[in-house]
Amino acid sequence: MTGKGGMADEAMPFNCRRKSFVKPRTDCAGEYPGRVWNKKSIYPDWIFIRDVLYRMNGMEKIMECISISFRSAPEETRKRFAFPAGETGVKERTAFLEEAGEAVLLSTCNRTEVYAAGEGSFGRLEELLSEKSGMPSTQVKQLARRFVGEKACAHLYRVACGMDSMVVGEDEILGQVRAAYLFSSERGFCGYELNTVFQGALACAKKIKTETLLSKTSVSVATLACAEIFRFAKLRGKAAALPDGSGKAADGEAGPSESKTAGEKADQRALEVLLIGGSGKMGGSVLKNLLGREGIHVYATRRSHGLGEREGGRLSIVDYRDRCRFLERADVIVSATESPHYTLTAGETEKYLKCSGAEKPRLFIDMAVPADIDRQIASLPGCRVLGMDDFERLAEENNRKKQQAVLDAETLLTEELEELYKTLLFHETAGQLDRIRERFAGYSAERFLFYLKDRLDAASLKAVLEALKEETGEGADCRQA
């Protein structure tokens, strides 16, 4: 078939604009991860034709992924698959990839995943993971989740976007995926498919991060608490109000005035936080969040583990018995212990604050059940107390925001995956245009349509016919031949 509208010139007689489409067979739903199959769904015209070409071109398995994560294995088991940091980790990762072939290795505290180009790699990867963990390959097979082709691509996109994380929307995973990809690509372990898929996943994650609230909403009690602390710092004009701790706002962002008096400028010193119970899981999470922001000094009743030195002296370890002595200087007091008794009572707090003679706004945050902080402290001048009940309300609001953000992210993710599939499809098909031209050289348009009619189901053929009629300007309505 040649000529202006023929296959030889146009390569494929359909356009890729999105349009309303009929509901496909229900047994197709599992083949398209990330899509919501209902009568109101919107699909690209090429979606079914793409699958035909995948089978013609051998593209059913663009990539395979084997995953051992928090979804399939407990922490103690996951540790056996983790790769260490530093030079030792570099050597281990490189040796693993040399055996795996064209692949990317992602190893974090919550997951170890291998993304391998092509097909038929699961057996080899299971053996490598068995050697790494010291576990029998049969046990590795039971622990591992497997993803093939489009499902592997969709899984990577969800991982990079933080949608498969233990804490949905967390940002750290994006940097970890980027580092894993760069490690492989810089050492020659990535071909066209892996480069295209990983670059697409990273771009999709950035787009979701900027265009949705998925990573902008707090996702735990600890992060909610820190968000309240940072909000308090901003209201007080503290240096910690901004991420860089400078006290200066970026262009277009509200910040402390440049023309403050000497007294007002003095109040822009570091925000001082007294953390009672920093050794626990929740207290430790708060501590890490606080030390991740410049302009904050933390006095913590916990073992140091060397954190004080690593954080540039912004962490001071204090004896629990001396905690009340630090009430005078503290702007924020956080308590997160498992004590059955108050760590701060209203009486002793009032006594120490009166002795200091300093009245200033103070924020008390109680993250314990039963309560650590006497609620009567809220009646003292300048004191505000937030407890778990307050955080439950904040979390409910956060969850409502998060649900909408997840829906928004799912929509963007589906669109970006479709762009990826089109890119991979046409890249693979472009090298076969001569074969296609030769195969259909003697076909008229009518004969070619009958050729498709004999090979496609009704929904697929309708998609082609509607697309062809739209290209000829006759509208989208057509009846099944």
Image: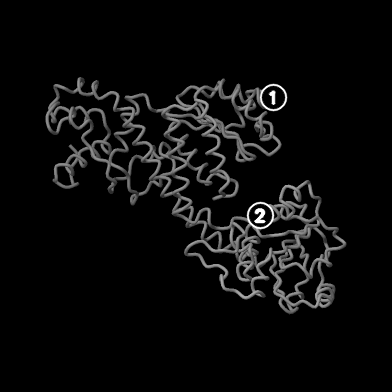
Q: Residue at x 51, y 27 (%)?
A: 103
How far across and down, in percent of the image, does residue 280 sit? 76, 52
Q: Residue at x 60, y 22 (%)?
A: 95
Q: Residue at x 72, y 59 (%)?
A: 297
| Residue wearing tag 2 | 289
Crowd tier of the residue under label 2, counting other residues whose Cα lies within 10 Å: few below 14, some 14–19, many 20 or above: some
Q: What colouring method underlies this structural image?
A: one colour
> On the image, which quarter does residue 298 sit in?
bottom right
The reply, left or right, for residue 449 in relation to residue 398 is left
| Residue wearing tag 1 | 134
Indicate whether 45 appears above or below 144: below
Q: Kindly report which numbered mark, 1 or 2, lies closer to the viewer in this rendering.
A: 2
Q: Earlier in the sequence, mark 1 or mark 2?
A: 1
SS at badge 1: loop
Please name whichever residue, 344 or 31, is drawn nearer the observer in this view of the structure: 344
How far across and down, in percent of the image, does residue 132 sit? 66, 25
Q: CA distance from mark 1 to mark 2?
A: 35 Å
In the picture, the quarter occupied by the N terminus is top left
In the picture, the quarter occupied by the C terminus is top left
Which mark is drawn over residue 172?
A: none
Q: Residue at x 50, y 25 (%)?
A: 189
The reply, left or right, for residue 246 in relation to residue 8 is right
How far across and down, in percent of the image, does residue 404 sit? 47, 57
Please name whichever residue, 470 or 104, is drawn nearer the observer in this view of the structure: 104
Kind of residue at badge 1? Gly
> On the image, which quarter does residue 380 sit in?
bottom right
How far across and down, in percent of the image, does residue 292 sit? 65, 53
Crowd tier of the residue under label 1, counting other residues whose Cα lies within 10 Å: few below 14, some 14–19, many 20 or above: few
The residue positioned farthest toward the right in the image shown: 321
- Circles 1 and 2 in contact, beta carbons < 8 Å: no
Tag count in the figure? 2
